[in-house]
Amino acid sequence: MLLPRLGGGTPRELNSEIITAWAPGGSSIVSWWPQARELVLTDVTSGDTTGTIALEMPHVWVYGVDWSPDGDRLAVSTEDEGTSILWTIALDDGEPTVVLEDSVTVMSPRWSPGGEVVYYLRGSEQQSMELRRVRVSPDGTADGDPERVLSALPVGSRHQSMPALSLSQDGSRLFYLRRTGYSNIWLAEVGGSAGNRTIQQRQLTTGTAQRSNPRFSPDGTEVVYVEAAASQSNVFVIPVEGGAPRQVTFQDNEVWSPAWSPDGSRIAYGATVRDAMRVWVVDRDGGTPSVFPNTRFSSGNRLAWAPLAEIVYQIPDDQNYHKLDPVTEAETPLIAEPLNGWQYNPRPSPDGSQVAFWWNRTDSLADGIWLASTNDGSAELSVAGFHPLNWNGRGNALFAMPGDPTGSPSADVFLAPLSGREPELFVTLPFRADSRHVDISPDGRRIVAAVEESQSDAWIVVNFDTNVGN
């Protein structure tokens, strides 16, 4: 959307992309999605698309784009299987050039006003970041090694793909967003019946760590979740009835999305090993975890296991899942012909014959809950406009939340029959939560969620880099 600078007037939609950078002079913008395969150039006055730039380099995420002051190049940061790369792309031929590679996240590239330097953020949003700079030659290659400009910047945004800093036109001031917060695991116990349901809530964890991805054990007595501190995160388990959590993994990196085995004796999760994201398995009581070395896991996305014999996990680019046999390590795609949009939140049915997931289609078919057959890989739309939390015990309906799972947190939980009837409001939670961090028992009597408390503010650093001719 294009908004008048000082207010007033009507906002004008320029395109359907969600992230934007201005061209020098302000006559055009370049826009993209976090998982874009191309960048879109748009004339601000007419609203017409004036061109696209294909991102042909291997990548899963786009972590930032900025237009050079002379208008000839773009600086683009991407991530692919645990490696972040900073590129420059010449606008005359679209040819990408590698500036640097890093095993740590590189995001929010910004050109200096003279175009001789690209600044960028390096680090994880679970810890303070560094502001670095790299000098760039006229041909778009690096002119020397990266240098640290500022350390311990508490920068934060909702996602690495979203812009987190900018420079003033004269290059003397740095503007950045600081977002701080924590999350705890809460349990909501649902009583009563339709039209007269009651809720009692209870906090299972305390403290100021970031907790996410809670999942009930198959017998419903425990909850597994991820707890993050500094640059590390690990798998924890806590009894539903309360008590001290126990740490299950002791990794020195980040982990994601724990999922229980059918008998509840083991836990699968995603983690980084040698700069690549893999699927791991550990006993529920801890011990030495084992890795599936041939897996390629998509960071930040989801695993599913019980009640299936196979582990279902998201592969890079988020356009399909793989079924992994934990005994033979054989893998097969879940969906026969995906490659259209992105999928999230896999939820196997009670009998294991289907996996429900949210599918963001890029064609004319509706976004919403789709069902994939675990036998032949066929997929069909089940409930438009919703994303799944879990199946009910009989397997004929899905507990779901409305909208996009990557959007704003919600408090409303619906029950969506597979018969085609409209979803009905099941319960309104006493807190709002991201559906990717919510689980519900098959009988609908217990709901567990990671509930976030956060705040953000804006900061300006004056004369942050006196060594560049700004």
Image (cartoon, grey):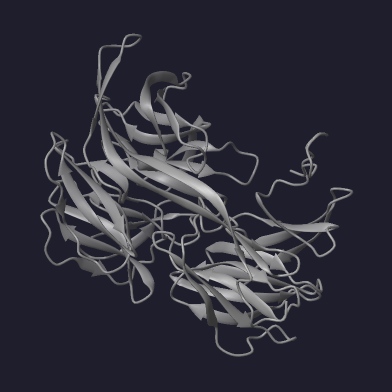
Where in the figure is residue 216, as x and y percent of width and height?
22, 39
Tell me where residue 210 appears, x and y as whole percent: 33, 50
Q: Residue at x 13, y 33 (%)?
A: 241
* Position above or below: 335 against 143: above
- Give the residue drawn at x 68%, y 62%: 38
> Is 407 situated left or right of 41 in this image?
left
Q: Quadrant location of residue 142?
A: bottom right
Q: Is residue 355 visible?
A: no
> Quick check: 237 left or right of 152?
left
In the image, residue 318 above or below residue 172: above
Is any atom of residue 96 visible in this view? yes
Instruction: Determine which quarter of the picture holds residue 346.
Output: top left
Q: Looking at the image, which is closer to me, 323 or 391?
A: 391
142 or 57: which is nearer to us? 142
Q: Nearer the viewer, residue 255 or 211?
A: 211
Q: Is residue 380 above or below residue 111?
A: above
Q: Position of residue 246 (x, y in %)?
A: 14, 51
- What residue is rendered at 18% in x and 48% in y? 237
Residue 427 percent location from the top left of the image: 36, 20
